[in-house]
Image (cartoon, coloured by chain):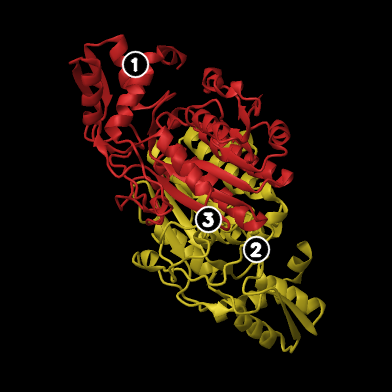
Chain colours: A yellow, B red
């Protein structure tokens, strides 16, 4: 059993990770500034006596150091997770994703914590020239501030691992779906259709091909990688071996809701600047460690819709 | 003729660039905090009426914005350029290279300046798995805070170019030699031999293979790339098509000085953590634009030694 520190603990993925770690018997300290996290997501965790929560910001270095002290393993998931609106506030990704990650690394170094799991993103591949995209694909070009800020975090982690004998697993996610999902296009579409069932406004032409992974499968993969120790740092793509068009997920959503809205597309092949028209990651590396996804994209979308319909309060929090 | 803004203007490479730009008739504004730059390097530039100098830090955003206002092209060369000592002050590279580059980009955006040349580094390739290393080599792993901080700068630049319709040339340098050279192993070896001609202490076992480029060739290459406009961002390796062992450059230096010192090696194949035992870049991309290097490594080392012997004052400034 380990003492595990989780940043962004009240967020979608991290709160699911916290629950899993607690169910496995680990001591868990959650850290979150509650800017987008929801304390409701930690109600289950708070039933455990071996869970503690600190409200704090990764940009508050002294608070971070103090909260992290005594941990053996850190999962750093606190981030500005919104890829789409980066251009509207160009300093946010730098601060929350790059400087925030440096703070976590430096706090770990100062407190002697050596093991790290980091939530990066498939967005670091930009518009990949190889699809399905492996971890060692050709050196990519960044197309979003979000991807650039996460790539910067990856590089800092690798350099810290090289220089200070730390060990890290870097996870490049596709979009994650499932319980406590609170942003992304399934969320946006669902919310639109609850508010105006007759019409759905879609960025892009619906032909963008994306891949999705269920949060439970995502956490299985993260823990599988963490349990296979390696020297220095490793990068793992996390995703399923299928993709679907935006128009397919729209069909899945309208079918689930029993609606036949008018669909209004805008823009071209890219929904917004920096949007990637085709995301599919090669996940052979994590699968070679024995992990496999259990849910299809369709099942993940359906579970997400069920969660949203049973927890409509999350629609009003954004 | 353009209005050109040069950061780090009093540094080794940038001051040579300033002189060249002035000789071509451009209006040049130099910006430098003089933390490692030398005003002596701008004595020639100050003879030109179309040169202005601002002492300022790229981390001082208002001062940077004000100095940069009205420019048409920015060369961003201000940086913490010391790869070797990153682990001794792990925030310095983040601040000076990553946050500093973000400040330059944001100042450009706010002031409507759209064209950028950026001094990155071959260190972003870490220990490359392909040598000679092309720009689109397999996605590398960072081995130094310096490389990580420059890679972060590259990513920010690419994302700004994508999002805000800017245009950038990113230059990944090998080590640069020549007039006004003030740090690196030729400098260290020369300084040691001036101080104690009988013994030379060398980090590593002397078998590290490195490549070097003369500062004049480097500036030719930068201006060649800038003169070939491209949409968004481009990356160019800058180097020569040969490498030499550290022991070879030692031989060149001792021969130049007429010394036969005892040579004491320490450490293994890597001189320090993050040192790369073999650096050689594939420069086909920049050569396809018509550029070619004019000086060999040996000639560059000799010119550097001549400069140092004629300008011994620089030995005392570090």
Label 3: chain?
A: A
Label 1: chain?
A: B
Front-most of residues A77 and A21 = A77
SS label for mark 2:
loop
SS label for mark 1:
helix
Residue B243: x and y in percent read 27, 40
Is residue A122 toward the left or the right of residue B62 in the image? left
Residues at discs 1 and 3 both on one chain: no
Residue for badge 3: A119
Is residue A127 toward the left or the right of residue B267 in the image? right
Residue at left 49%, top 32%?
A: B90
Residue B80: x and y in percent read 50, 31
Give the Cα separation between the discs numbered 3 and 2: 23 Å
Is residue A154 toward the left or the right of residue B62 in the image? left
Badge number at residue B191: 1
Label 2: chain?
A: A
Residue at left 64%, top 79%?
A: A206
């Amino acid at each position: 059993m380990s003492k595990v520190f989780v940043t962004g603990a009240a967020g979608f993925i991290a709160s699911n990770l916290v629950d899993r770690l607690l169910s496995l018997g680990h001591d868990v300290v959650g850290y979150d500034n509650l800017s987008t996290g929801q304390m409701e997501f930690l109600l289950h965790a708070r039933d455990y006596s071996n869970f503690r929560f600190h409200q704090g910001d990764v940009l508050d270095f002294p608070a971070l150091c103090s909260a992290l002290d005594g941990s053996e393993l850190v999962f750093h998931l606190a981030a500005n997770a919104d890829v789409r609106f980066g251009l509207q506030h160009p300093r946010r990704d730098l601060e929350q994703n790059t400087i925030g990650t440096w703070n976590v690394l430096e706090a770990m170094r100062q407190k002697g914590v050596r093991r790290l799991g980091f939530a990066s993103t498939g967005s670091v591949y930009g518009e990949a020239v190889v699809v399905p995209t492996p971890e060692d694909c050709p050196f990519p070009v960044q197309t979003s501030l979000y991807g650039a800020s996460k790539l910067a975090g990856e590089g800092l982690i690798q350099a810290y691992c090289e220089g200070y004998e730390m060990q890290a697993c870097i996870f490049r996610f596709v979009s994650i779906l499932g319980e406590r999902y609170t942003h992304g296009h399934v969320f946006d579409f669902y919310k639109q259709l609850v508010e105006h069932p007759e019409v759905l406004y879609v960025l892009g032409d619906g032909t963008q091909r994306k891949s999705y992974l269920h949060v439970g499968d995502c956490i299985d993969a993260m823990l599988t990688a963490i349990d296979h120790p390696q020297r220095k740092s490793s990068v793992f793509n996390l995703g399923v071996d299928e993709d679907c068009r935006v128009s397919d997920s729209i069909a899945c959503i309208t079918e689930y809701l029993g609606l036949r809205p008018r669909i209004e597309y805008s823009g071209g092949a890219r929904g917004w600047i920096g949007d990637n028209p085709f995301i599919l990651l090669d996940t052979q590396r994590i699968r070679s460690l024995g992990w496999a996804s259990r849910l299809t994209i369709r099942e993940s979308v359906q579970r997400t819709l069920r969660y949203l319909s049973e927890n409509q309060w999350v629609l009003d929090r954004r």
